[in-house]
Image (cartoon, rainbow, N blue to C red):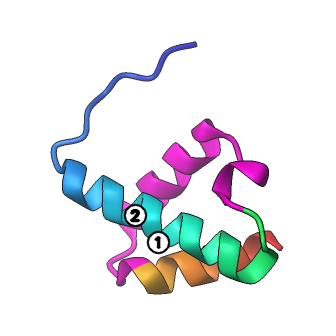
Amino acid sequence: MTIEYDRSDDSLWQQFMDALSDEFLKQTGFGIYAHITPLDVNSAYQEFQQHQMPIHHFAHNYVRAYI
């Protein structure tokens, strides 16, 4: 399965990945891919784009809901 690469803002994607990975590490002691798949990360990013909230707030809420 391939995912089309359609990210107009790579900087925002990288900030999102950093925040989500840091939050998983902070709350669980393990990084992002110890918990969720790359497809889940992509879905989380799409969900983040629909919610108009700061990245770190979204990441915190996402990880809390996950664990």
Instruction: Determine if the magenta segment contains residue 23.
Output: no
User: Between 10 and 26, which is closer to the camera in this rendering?
Assistant: 26
Q: Residues within 10 Å of mark 1 (few under 14, many from 20)?
A: some
Q: In the picture provided, is 48 more to the left or to the right than 30?
A: left
Determine which quarter of the picture holds residue 22: bottom right
In this picture, residue 34 sits left or right of residue 48: right
Q: Which residue is mark 2?
A: 16
Q: Which span is picked out in magenta?
A: 31-55
Q: Amino acid at mark 2?
A: Phe
Indicate which disc residue 19 carries: 1
Q: Position of residue 23 (x, y in %)?
A: 60, 76
Q: Position of residue 52 (x, y in %)?
A: 32, 78
What amino acid does circle 1 point to? Ala
Res. 32 image quadrant: bottom right
Vertical order, 16 against 55 (above or below): above
Quarter of the picture holding the C terminus? bottom right
Q: Secondary structure at mark 1?
A: helix
In the displayed image of the protein, which residue is found farthest to the top? 1
**Where's residue 26, x and y in %?**
68, 81
Does 23 appear above or below 8? below
